[in-house]
Image (cartoon, grey):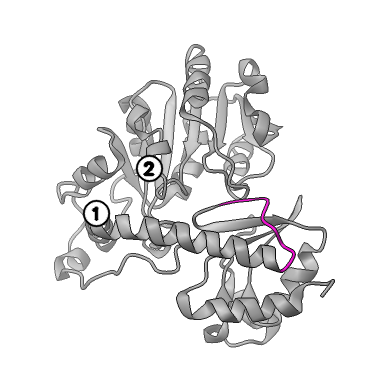
Amino acid sequence: MLEHGGQLHAAATRYAIPLENWLDLSTGINPNGWPVPHLSPSAWARLPEINDGLEQAAQAYYATPHLLPCAGSQAIIQALPKLRPTCRVGAPDIAYAEHAYAWQQAGHQILTLPYDNMGAMIEQLDVLIIINPNNPTGQCYSTEILLEWRLALNRKGGWLIVDEAFMDVTPNNSLMPYSPLPGLIILRSLGKFFGLAGARVGFAAAEMNPLHLLRDYLGPWTLTGPSREIAKQALIDKNWQQLTRIQLKQASMRLSHLLSQHGLEPDGGTALFQWVRTSEAEIIQETLARQGILVRLFKQPQSLRFGLPRKPEWDRLERALCTSMPLN
């Protein structure tokens, strides 16, 4: 299995620091997630049903008529390579690694491409994977260029797969309104913006044929009853969504400024994280971990991803940064 952020129990064991004493900045998940209310007893007692309003809430939130709820976008990532015969797949060189890994494990040929030039080999590809905004660099592609690539791929029966896990703060940049176009598959998740990673709720949006293939492959009851109820309520809570977008943008700017003050000027990021390239990444990650602060380490290229602290935790992060920079 590939490494991911959020391995807090392992960190607690390795550094002999109790779990409750950690500040986890390794995941890019909203630390002030949507407040989950008391759930109805029927959510636990009955098999999930599709006429509970979740699909309608998701269609309104994502501005698309066709989508399929799944157990997190990871389930979609692992399933899509099983729905095509062996083909050539373009994947970013610096990105969420599960995409390329899933296609490679299914026997497809992977072409690793630089994220700032993903369309260079479009004529040689059957599938192109884009993470927009990219994780961890935060880079984005415009709607216009993505639709051009979709058209080029669809002409030969190919797919453009766009993972929009970090798109919720900037919904106007989403390709979701175009998801009924043939050859376009979009992935969304409630894990990041809504802070509901534990509920394992994701959506695939596309024209009906690939959605039917995906639904048949995954089978019934892909989401638990409690997850469906939580997701539906979170998706219709417009007031929380609007306020949270403002708060996350402000917090991300504060994080960028704080890191820059300590010699770690970000090279990219989103409203949910900042990404810093530094040759001292491993040293800084280790020094922070010994103080009970977990950040995401990337070895290629050497870099760190910092998620957002909760309000009481900003001072703790600043104190730790003062002692973690090798040149200080």
Q: Is residue 121 left or right of residue 212?
A: right
Residue 136, placed above or below residue 151: below
Residue 115 in which image quadrant: top right
- Residue extent of the magenta highlight: 262-269
x, y percentage for residue 289?
A: 69, 77
Residue 20, placed above or below residue 68: below
**Residue annotated with mark 2:** 171
Say which element carries label 2. Answer: helix
The amino acid type found where label 1 is placed reads: Lys
**Distance of mark 1 from mark 2, alpha carbons?**
13 Å
Residue 9, placed above or below residue 195: below
**Residue annotated with mark 1:** 238
Report the front residue among 324 and 85.
324
Q: Residue at x 57, y 21 (%)?
A: 126
x, y percentage for residue 297?
A: 69, 61
Q: Is residue 63 left or right of residue 291?
A: left
Quarter that holds the C terminus: bottom right
Q: Is residue 139 left or right of residue 111?
A: left
Q: Residue at x 33, y 31 (%)?
A: 177
The amino acid type found where label 2 is placed reads: Pro
Residue 306 in sight here = no
Quarter that holds the N terminus: bottom right
Q: Are discs 1 and 2 less than 8 Å apart at CB?
A: no
Residue 293 in which image quadrant: bottom right
Residue 250, placed above or below residue 85: below
Residue 228 in sight here = yes
